[in-house]
Image: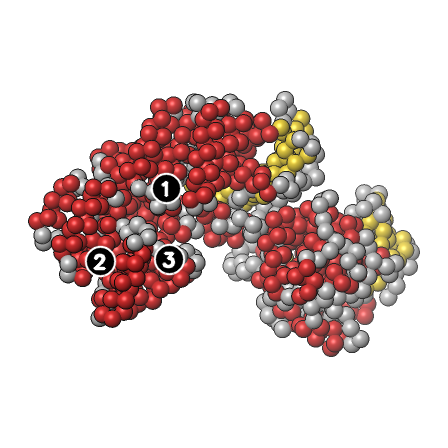
Amino acid sequence: MSLPAGTRLGPYEIVNPIGSGGMGDVYRAHDTRLDRDVAVKVLPERVSRDAEARMRFEREAKAVAALTHPNILSIHDYGSTDLAAYSVTELLEGQTLRQRLLEGPIPWRKAAEISAAIADGLAAAHAKGIIHRDLKPENLFLTHDGRVKILDFGIAQLVREEPEQQEDLSSMPTAPMKTDPHAVVGTAGYMAPEQLRGESIDATTDIFSLGCLLYEMVTGRPAFIRGTVIDSLSAILTDTPDVFTATERMIPYELARVITRCLEKNRSERFQSARDLAFALRAIGTSSALTFEAPSDVRRRKFVWGGIAIFAIVATLIAYFVVDSRPVSQSPSLRGSSATGRLGDSSTHSLAILPFINATGDKDAEYLSDGVTETLINTLAQVEGLRVMSRTSVFHYKDKAPNPVSVGRDLHVGSVVVGRIETAGDRLIVSAELIDANDNTLIWGNRYQTARADLFSVQQSIASEIARMLRLQLTGREQQILAKRPTTDPRAYELYLKGRFQWNKRNADGLYAAIERFNEAIEIDPQYALAYAGLADCYNLLDIWAGLPTNETFPRAKAAAQKALAIDDQLAEAHTSLAYAIHTYEWDWTTAEREYRRAIELNPNYATARQWYAEFLTANGRFDEAGAQGKKALELDPMSPIINAVVAWNFTMARRYDAAIRQGQQTTRLFPSFMPGHAYLGLAYLESRRPNEAITAFDASQKIQDITVIFTWLIRAHLAAGHRDEAAKLIAQLESRGRREYLPPYYMAALYAHRGDRDRAFAELDRALHERTGALVWLEVDPALDPLRGDARFATALKKANF
C-alpha cells in the first residue's frame, strides 16, 4: 500500500514517500499540531497482518524512545489507525551510508569521525542494555549538516534481566524487547561470529559490525560479503581481512590496527566497550603523529596474533583518554571545560583512579602522568569516608585501557577516574573524567590547559571536584589537605615526581636514581617534606633490592623520615617509613607500633602502612590483629602482588598452613611471574610437611629469579623429602656461591638447624644479631627455627632482639 499525499495518520499529513525497507515505508509528513515536518514510518500492508511483524515494529519504536542521544534517530510519536501502524521520528536530510559508499571509499579521517559518532550512539544504547544487532550501511544516515544517525532498532535485543512480574512495565520501555538470545538475526556480511553460531550477544557484537562498516568505508568494499550468502557467512567465521593492504597503505597503521581489533573472531579480543572505541578513533583522527608503514615484523607476519597483541598495548594507550569537544570556559588560572552527569550516591564512595595516559609524545614525560595519578590517590586517600584504591592495584591497568565497569567489578569500587596528559605548545592539557562504575555513565568531566608550573593547581581542582561530585562532607582538615601545596617550587615538584617514578621500578638502579632526584628536589626546596619521605622509602628498600647492609640503609631511612615529620607531622607516608625502619632495624616495638597507628589514623587508605603493620603484628605473635590488617590491605590493594604474597607469609608464621597455602595458590594464579608468590607458597608447603610440593614451588620461584634465601629453603625441602644426595649437591653449590656473594646469616642459621648442626646455626644467628639483619624480626614466631628453641642460647637471642 502506498499512501497518497494528503493522507492523514492521526495529526500527521503525508507529503510524499521517502523510501522503503523491510520494516516499513517512510514518508515525509507534516505535523499539523506543531507545524513541522517529520518522518513517518508505516508498517507495510504486506506485513501488517503479521502479529510478529507488528510486535517488532512496536519494539523498535520503544527501543528508540528509550534512547536520547544526538547520534540516534529521535522518535516523536507512535500510533495506529484503521490504515496502519506507524511511528513518527525527526526528519533527516542527507543520505544513508550505503548511498555514500556507492560513490567510493571515504577519506580515512572522515571515516574515523563517522565511526566515532556511531560508537558514541552505541555506547548510549549499550548503557541502557540495548544491543542493535543489525548495524549496516542502510541503517546509518549522514545528514547534510554533518551529523551521523543510527536507524532501525527493529531487531535490537535487551541484554539485562527481565523485571519481576509485578513491576510496572510502563516505566520500562525497553522491557518488551526481549527476544530469543540464541536466534540468528542480522544481515549477512555484518554479523559477528557469535551471532552466526546462535550464541548470546553483548556490546562487542555491535563493535564487530561497526568494524565491518569502518573497513568498508576506508576500502570501498565490504569486509566479508562474498558471491553468495553462504560464502559470506563462512567468511565471517574464517577470513581475516587485511585492511592495511586493502587500502594500499593509504590509511594510518594505527587505524588499521583498530579495525583489525574490532574484527577479532574472539569477542574478548575486541574493544570491550563502544566508548573505548570512540576514544581510540578520535585520538587517531586528531593525531599528527601517525605512521603509514607497518613495522617490519608485522610486514612479514601481517596481522597474526603477535601483531595484534602488540596493538592491544600500543593502540589502547591513546584509546581511553582524549581531550573532548565540550565548550571551553575561562577561569583566572585555568582554561577548562566541564560536563556534569548525575551525582554520585553512597555506592560511589569507593574510588579507583586509573593511571593517566601520557600523550605528550615524550616517553621521558611518563613521570608526569604517573605523578598526577599518584598525587591524586595520596590526596584523596586522606578523605574520611572515601575508600581509594592504592597505586599498585590501579597501575595493574596501566597501558590496558580497561572498561570502567570491569574495573569497578574487579576492585569493588563505585566510581572510576580516567585521565590524560598531552601538550599544546609549551603548555599541558590535562583531561579527567569521573565515571560511575555501575553503568559507565559520566558523573563529571573537565579539561584543563595550564603551564607546567601550575600543574599542582590542576590536581587540586580535580581532587576538589571529585570530592564535590561524590557528595563528600569534608572536614576542615580535609579541605586543607585538598588545598595543600607540598612545595611552592614547580621545579622541585617535577623532580619529586621523577623520583617517585624511579622508586616504583623497585630495582637497584631505580632506587639510586630516585635518591638523586629527591636530593635535587630538596636542594631547591629544603622544606619539601614529601621529598624527604621519598628518600626514607628508598633507604628502607635498599637492603632488599640492592643488597646493601642494613646498618648502612636503615639509619638513613630513619633520619630522612624524621626530617620529613619535622617539617610536616601529618604525612602518613613518613610515619610509615619511620615505623618500618624502627621495627626492622632497631626492634623498638612500642615506638614502631605508635608510628604505624599514627600513619593509619592519618590515611586509613594507605595499604602499605597496613601491610607493614600486619608484618609487625605477626612478628609479635598477634596473629588475629595481623589477619585483620592484612585483610584490610588486600581490600585497599587487591592487585598488589607483594601484599597478596605477604598475607600468605603471615599465615605461615602464624602456623595457619591451610590458609597460607590457599592464599599462596591464589597469589600464584593472579601473578604467575611474581617470584615471592611461588616462594612463599613453597614455604607454606615446607612448614606443613609437604616437601615435594614445596620443591615444585621453589623450583618455579628460582626459574623466575635466583635468590639465595629461596635456595636455602629449597635445600631444606630436599632434606625434608629425604633427598640426601640432591641436598648435598645443592649445599656444595651454596658454599661455592658463598665465596662470591653474601649468604644471609638468618637463613643460613635455619638451614644448619635443619641439618642438625646447632653450633653452626647459633654462630650464624650471632652474626645476624651483630649485623642487625632485618629478618631477625621473625625470630619469635618463625617455624624454621623450631629446632633451636629448646636451647638456652635461643632465649638469649630473643632478648638481644628485644622480644
The residue at 48%/52% (across/down) is 409
- Name the N-terminal-most of marks 2 and 1: 1
Residue identifier under label 1: 542
Q: Is residue 343 left or right of residue 476?
A: right
Secondary structure, mark 1, is helix
Secondary structure, mark 2, is helix
Secondary structure, mark 3, is loop
Camera-nearest residue between 361 and 170: 361
Camera-nearest residue between 624 and 185: 624
Residue identifier under label 3: 706
Residue identifier under label 2: 751
Say above or below: 377 vs 245: above
The residue at 62%/24% (across/down) is 333
Q: Position of residue 596 (x, y in %)?
A: 30, 36
Q: Quadrant of the C terminus?
A: top left
Q: Is residue 719 left or right of residue 199?
A: left
Q: Point out the residue furthest to the front here.
A: 739
Instruction: Estimate how packed mark 1 is, as few (under 14), some (14 to 19) or many (20 or more) residues with alpha carbons within 10 Å.
Output: many
- Name the N-terminal-most of marks 3 and 1: 1
Instruction: Estimate how packed mark 3 is, as few (under 14), some (14 to 19) or many (20 or more) residues with alpha carbons within 10 Å.
Output: few
Please report contact status of discs 3 and 2: CB closer than 8 Å, yes or no: no
